Amino acid sequence: MKDLRSKINDIAKRRGIFWNSYEIYGGVAGFYDYGPVGANLKKNLLDLWLEEFVYRDGLMLIDSPVIGPEIVYRASGHVDKFADFMVRCKSCGHAFRVDELIGEFVEIPDALSPEEMNRVIREKNIRCPDCGGELTDVEEFHLMFSTRIGLDKVGFLRPETAQGIFVNFPLLYRINREKLPMGVAQIGRAYRNEISPRQGVLRQREFNMAEIELFVDPEERFDDSRIEDVELPLLKMDGEFIRLSAREAFEKGIVNAYMAYYMARIMRFLEKIGIDTSRVRFRQHHREELAHYSKDTWDCEIELSRGWVEVIGIAYRGAYDLEHHMQYSGADMRAFRKFKEEKIVKRRKIVPRMEILGPMYKGKAKSVAEVLEGMEAPEEKVELKVEMNGSTYTIPEDAYDIVEEERKVSGERFIPHVVEPSFGIDRLIYAILEHTYYEREDSGYKVLRIPPRIAAVKAGVFPLMNRDGMDTRAREILDILRKNGINAYYDDSGSIGRRYARADEIGVPFCITVDYQTLKDGTVTVRERDSTEQKRVPVEKLPDTLRNLIEGRISFGELDAHVR
Amino acid sequence: MKDLRSKINDIAKRRGIFWNSYEIYGGVAGFYDYGPVGANLKKNLLDLWLEEFVYRDGLMLIDSPVIGPEIVYRASGHVDKFADFMVRCKSCGHAFRVDELIGEFVEIPDALSPEEMNRVIREKNIRCPDCGGELTDVEEFHLMFSTRIGLDKVGFLRPETAQGIFVNFPLLYRINREKLPMGVAQIGRAYRNEISPRQGVLRQREFNMAEIELFVDPEERFDDSRIEDVELPLLKMDGEFIRLSAREAFEKGIVNAYMAYYMARIMRFLEKIGIDTSRVRFRQHHREELAHYSKDTWDCEIELSRGWVEVIGIAYRGAYDLEHHMQYSGADMRAFRKFKEEKIVKRRKIVPRMEILGPMYKGKAKSVAEVLEGMEAPEEKVELKVEMNGSTYTIPEDAYDIVEEERKVSGERFIPHVVEPSFGIDRLIYAILEHTYYEREDSGYKVLRIPPRIAAVKAGVFPLMNRDGMDTRAREILDILRKNGINAYYDDSGSIGRRYARADEIGVPFCITVDYQTLKDGTVTVRERDSTEQKRVPVEKLPDTLRNLIEGRISFGELDAHVR
């Protein structure tokens, strides 16, 4: 399996999918570049994601800054809780994540206290993986990148795009005309200053996310007819693994309706982007594993050469984030829930008696009365104290009445709950590469069977030979395709077979060859990557035909009928 | 004009285009959120940019990290030179950019030394704009956001996406099979820690860029037939303003061919995205204004309510960046230029005479001879010195010969030059809003005449009334549009007139109304934003029709013929 990994990494670097950044300076761990093929693959993947998860469901898309002021990440809990435990080697100075070092000895490393971690390291005699040296005691390492805004304001690079959505809840709720459920999506970079990242693109310090925060009224029932009929592979917290339909999983109470809905949608999405869904599972977090904000989390894991890797997470964040931002900012982060019918609410209320307060407090009496009115009425009449501008005013029993009042109330304010499907885009891209990679049985040539819809480059245009006008015609065709918005390239180097092989290696789904017949009858051959079949298509129908093939409106098998 | 600005800002916040970030915490200057309308507008704008500038010309797109290690920005010159001059108020402590304070008194503030700036401030008695207090002496303020990578490595947030391209030149050149010109594009965030940003979205600390680095062989002539026939408004460094075609501007030597090519392409692009090109000009930088890396820069400026604002820059960066990265990294950042025909190169060469060196330097003789061979041959035979491992070895005249050698050379290595069109996406978006805004003559209703291709939301779907099945039918149609990839929304609140007005305000180009006739004959009305005309379209033709209208394949006037 390591073999597959090195094959993918080799293609990735040689052909421009991704590579470790800043190579000319020796590279910096945890940072990757997407080359021309990777950047386009990523763009196409995100476009499909937007279409499937955002536009189709009518969610709101926003785009907030990466840098946030300290208070935002105090409120979110990240300043206090977003840390890993690390040890350093006393000889070579290298630093390591403790959970990775003790992972083979302890089932849930995150559940241990620092003392327990130290004990495991000593008892199991764990030493520096790089030089065998002795390790220091466990210390905490904060995972946010920090910086300064302006002259002296502390700022952090966001560890998730989510907080940019939460802090905007009041505005977004208003723009959405105060309706729930309200889904808000964001795509962008997020940051995690890993101590010592060693897992290639799977563990980056700067990574790409696509997140959805679905704000819901916890008392309102989700329209479960929307849950699609898809079989889910579920690994429950108790270790039981079951396959059952999303609807059943919801009906049996294994997951809530929102989770079931998104799990089904995710399965369909993974299929569309070329993931082998027989190597996908949803794993429920153990209680000790849950992030500080989460009540229940299911990770969508994909089996890769490194084993099962978390690629997407669905967290039930409850009211955690909005509640905390409300506390820290004082802003009202609540939504309004209308009652089915107006309620009559009885309320006991203080009514000040000015004939007594007036003479007592003179010029201040009015202000004292106002504060008094706002206070909660006591069970029985007692002497009360009004605190105002640092002074205390005593209110004798006879200076007020208690009146019972009836009010019609049409609804109430509450803090919405949040369901968060969160996609790790870089891991998804890597998973696509591993799952679509194969070698042709006959030739051993490498192929990426990436679905046309998300393939980086859609077509290669090849002149059979560089003469008799075939090259000129091929360049014209290239230009036509490009003007029609089809990302295509020109290749006239080496045999047609070599050119096919080069195209296959980066997953180009269609190759167009201009040959002698083209010059006679205006048709070209279109060769499909996976079947290696070829069919002739008239040039004037080529852009439309390719578009239809790419969008999946027709299959290659149906092409003859379509072109005729 | 200030009025226009506040109208745009009002719509922007109320309707979800953009707003100052972190409002619930009092806001942080220089950071903005794109709301649902703004984020989609930005996405569509960038998609069009990709199509026009990247895919159509077959450029490479890459995606590199925001965080870079210190050495990259030492090499690029940013650590030393990316700074502004600031003063603080001795009373209120606020900080200000000096060039903004003295701008009305000095033509090119950037050309002054700190002493000269201090003199202007004293002579003109410039005081704190906020409180009238006295100002401190001028000091330098570094504009890069800095952070730490891992435990202790200094990193910076990129001030431009360009460096991510330059450091990858060797890899990209190889992937491009060593061909020039080679264009590489990148879209992404960049950062500039402004001292005290006060110009709304026009001056942000975190902003969006789209950049192209075109690597060219300075000795190769650009294919100038590619320069489109577009009239350019040029404000030259010497103050002369002229309008002439891109080709003429090139032929008269006012701009080079690459600049002329991109200026023409930019004019066409601006027209497509709704900018009034009569309020566009290209302004050449004065020598003192040029960035440290640039030999010649033309800013594309757009006239806004604040006056002429730089939105796009085209810089001729020469070999500056690659040269510096080659120096700092030791990597070979050169390209290969093949000669038209092989050249015979004569070279005078030192040939050591071992029969003399051997006895002289014994065990060291071989190493000394190797170093000697690598040295440049002197004009005449003289005594030479070889420096090796800290020792000096004297080489008498008779210890070597000078031989003239002929070699065939097929080409030479050189550092490519770079032409850089760099787009400020946030400013472009703001310019679109100002230039497309108008108020209807009859009603005074506000409209954004944003071209359909980039409009955030393409269609509103309205039931005439919430009864007799019109609402159900409207929701079905909404669903059909969404499944066809058309970003649409549903609105059943208030009169149809109010709903049109709400749609106009955010530039929705088409509104679909489901009325009684829909229930009878299956047609809906499509109302076009700018003409306010309405036409009936059968529901089954709606997705295709809208797509054609959005892509500009048909105009609204041609719709009847199309639908029939």
Image (cartoon, coloured by chain):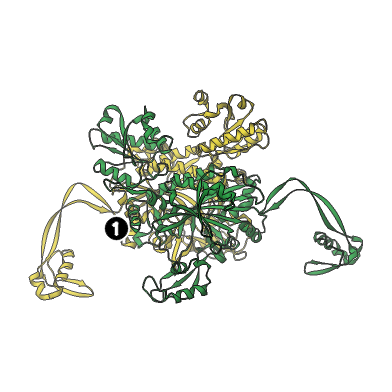
Chain colours: A yellow, B green
Quarter where residue A66 is shown: bottom left
* Image coordinates for residue B185, horizontal then vertical, percent: 55, 49
* Left or right: where A464 falls relative to A316: right
* Image coordinates for residue A151, horizontal then vertical, percent: 45, 68
Residue at (61% x, 24% y) in the render = A520
Residue at (36% x, 30% y) in the render = B560
Number of marks in picture: 1
Give whichever of B289, A564 is nearer the camera. B289
Give whichever of B218, B77 is nearer the camera. B218
Q: Is residue A33 above or below residue B490?
A: below
* Image coordinates for residue B274, horizontal then vertical, percent: 42, 46
Quarter where residue A88 is shown: bottom right
Q: Is residue A56 above or below residue B234?
A: above
Give the residue furthest to the left. A355
* Left or right: where B24 falls relative to B381: left
* Image coordinates for residue A354, horizontal then vertical, percent: 9, 69
Label 1's element?
A: loop
Give me the chain letter of mark 1.
Answer: A
Dot 1 alpha-carbon crowd within 10 angstroms: few under 14, some 14 to 19, many 20 or more: some
Q: Is residue A437 above or below residue A187?
A: above
Q: Pointer 1: what residue?
A: A332
Q: Amino acid at mark 1?
A: Asp
Residue B216 in view, yes or no: yes
* Left or right: where A382 falls relative to B180: left
Q: Quadrant of the N terminus of chain B?
A: bottom left
Give whichever of B138, B393 is nearer the camera. B138
Q: Quadrant of the C terminus of chain B?
A: top left
Residue B61 in view, yes or no: no
